[in-house]
Every structure is written in C-alpha cells, then in structure tokens.
Amino acid sequence: MFENMDKEYVLQTYPRNYVNFKQGINATLFDENKKDYIDFTSGIGVVSVGHGNEKVANAICEQVKNITHISNLFLIEPQAKLAKKISELYGKDVGTFFSNSGAEANEGAIKLARMYGAKKFKAKKYKIITLEHSFHGRTLATVKATGQDSFHKAEFSPYPEGFLYVKTLADVYENIDESTVAVMLELVQGEGGVTPFAKEEIQKLEKFLKEKEILLIIDEVQTGIYRSGEFLATNLYEIDPDIITLAKGLGGGVPIGAVVTKHKDVFGVGDHGTTFGGNFLATRAGCVVLDILEEYKNSGALDEALLYFDTKLKAIVQKFPSLFEKEVGLGLMRGLRCKEETNLPKIIKSAFEEGVLVLKAGRGTVRFLPPLTISKDEIDEGFKRLEISLEKIG
Ligand SMILES: *Cc1c(COP(=O)(O)O)cnc(C)c1O
C-alpha cells in the first residue's frame, strides 16, 4: 500500500528498498511484520547514538514543546553551547556556522574559502582542488567539487567554475597555480570505498599548503563526530586544517551541518546565512549527542566497540577469501573490499534477507557505518547473520 503511494507521489530518485520500519532500538530495527534487522548503516552514519535514543528523544521533546525555531536574528542558546562544545572537543579555538546538511556545510566552506581568497590577496584566488573518488554533496557546486565524473550529468550544466579534481595527493602539488585558494578532501573517502589517506602524506600536504598560503578544507561530514574513534578524524591525523565541515552524526538523526574554522573573521554580517540552520531543535539535539558520545569515548566503550568490530571484519575476510580482498577503513567507518565488484549488490541483498543492513560504497566495497553505541551483542548477531548470508553466495 505505502509502496504504491511512494511510487505515485514521491519523486523516484532513489533505488528504494520497500521494507517498512516501524521501530528502532539502538542498532536494531523492526519492520511492520516485527522481523528484526541489525543496522550496520545508522542511516548512512547519521544515527550516531542509536535509534530511539532516550536522552536525545527527551531533550528534543522538551525543546520542541517550548521553542523549536526563532531565527538567526536572535540569540539561540543551544547554538552557542554547541559551537563552544565543538571547539572544546576539537581542542582548537574555532568558530562555527550551522547549516542543515553536509552539502550545505561544504557550500559554506567553499564560500568562506572564496571570501578569504578575495580579501586576502591582491589578485583574487578562487580555485578549489579536490580528489578523485571524493564525495562532497549534491548541490551544483558540491557535486562539481565531487571527484566522480558520473555525478556530473551534462543535463545539469552549466556548473559553477573553479573546481578541479586530481587523481592522487601527489597530483595536488602539480596542479596548484596562482588562482588556487584551497584543497578540499576527506581524510577517509566514504562514498569512495572507505579509503583512508596515509597520515604522513596528509601531514606533508598540510605543511606545503601552509607555506603556499592555500587553505586546507577537510570534509568531515562522514568521518567527524567520533566516527574515526576520535572526535574528528582531523584529531586522529594530527593536522590543523583551515576549515572543517560536519553533518551526518552531529544531530543523531536531526538534520544539521556545520562549517568549523579558525578564520573567524572572514565572514562578516550578511555574508552568509540560512533560515533553519542552527535552530533550537537541531542544536539542542547536537548538544545532547556530543554529551553522550564524549562520555562514551571517555569510558573506553567506543574504543572497545571499534576493536571488536575490527576482529569481526578480519574473521570474515579470512573465512571468505574468494569474496573479499581485505578489510578497509578505520574506527567504525569500515568496509570489505570485494574481489568481484559484481558480487556487491548480491551481498547487500543477501544480508538484508538474513536481517542485517549494510551499505555499498565505491571501489566494490561493502560499507559498515553502525551506530557508535552498537552493543557487543548486536555486533555478534549482525556478523552471525552476515556469515550466513555470505555462505549463500560463495
Ligand atoms: C554525505 C556526505 C556529504 C553530503 O551530505 P548531505 O547531508 O547528504 O548533503 C558530503 N560529504 C561527505 C564526505 C559525505 O559523506
């Protein structure tokens, strides 16, 4: 019934799976027939503190019964608190602009970089270099920044100018010219196959860019908010970027994005804005999510979960050498690289039928983005089901 309704009234832009989920508890979902599924996707890295999280639910209920939204023309107390918390957990003196999504955060970062490029230099710098296999969003500018030709459909042209993507980090150096203002990259390419860059190479690039007065923008929409095991992957890589963008896991399911920068004075009043961004609902959710995850990290539970998940992935690779080449990624942003890319859709379907949700990613990768609060029992059950589903394939 709802499948037909969806097909008739919702624009069909997704390859949608018509399971109708009715209930969620941490990393477990139940459909309308009460069949349960272990959720290794957390809604693509969004439900960082699990489904139906009581602390988040209570905080946002209390908030929306009072004030949901006023506008950025007035002080928003939880927005100020969340911005302060981000700065504290990151450990650097930064300011934040709140948006509603990852793409919007990246748009904000691009605008900030261009404003910097115009204000700081005699001849305006505007060009932004990105990497092949990257993903930065679906707006015209961020999709143009995305380093995958398949996203640049000719029908959507003309695209904004000033973006160039290169194959490898080494190619960045050769493609910088006098109009380059920034390099934007993910430390672990999520959509691009859960592929981390080497720490030394990133640190070398960071040093070079600093010398050249070129900004480093780190897209942490997927890697941020403890996904890597640290608050930011930037913390893990021990770098000091100019701009960091956040979104997915920050609101625990409530839409929110953030542009975080140490260049606090580049944007002036009126330079950038949003109606919804940073409202009471979203930033209240962000505050409680960060409180929960900070405690989870400090208690050692997060580190335990990611180590445990790692041993489970390694066991799968060992048990199914004909299917998988290796495990990839870090923290709770992980993947299994398929030997045959054609197996990927079969694996996802078989896993779903067995009651475990996994995602696809580029380079023939089965992607795992479980809630960070996933329990040991849920990990055990999920991998048990995954094994059964893989046995059916090969
Ligand atoms: C998901 C994602 C985006 C886009 O975020 P939206 O909220 O879908 O706009 C941008 N960058 C990265 C690295 C992402 O993973």
Image (cartoon, helix red, strand yellow):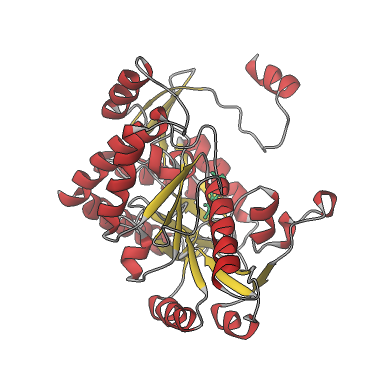
- Does residue 222 appear to the left or right of 63 in the view shown? right
Q: Note whether residue 388 is visible.
A: no
Measured from the top left, where is residue 235 in percent x and y?
A: 31, 64
Between 273 and 147, which is closer to the camera in this rendering?
A: 273
Between 307 and 35, which is closer to the camera in this rendering?
A: 307
The image quadrant of residue 340 is: bottom right
The image quadrant of residue 231 is: bottom left
The image quadrant of residue 319 is: bottom left
Q: Quadrant of the C terminus?
A: bottom right
Q: Tell me: residue 285, above or below residue 171.
A: above
**Residue at screen point 64% across, 68% down:** 126
Q: Tell me: residue 270, above or below residue 188.
A: above
Between 312 and 283, which is closer to the camera in this rendering?
A: 283
Measured from the top left, where is residue 320 in percent x and y?
A: 46, 60
- Does residue 251 appear to the left or right of 5 in the view shown? left
**Residue at screen point 61% across, 55% down:** 343
Q: Tell me: residue 222, above or below residue 33.
A: below
**Residue at screen point 54% across, 33% down:** 275
Q: Note whether residue 82 is visible.
A: yes
Q: State the count of labels.
A: 0
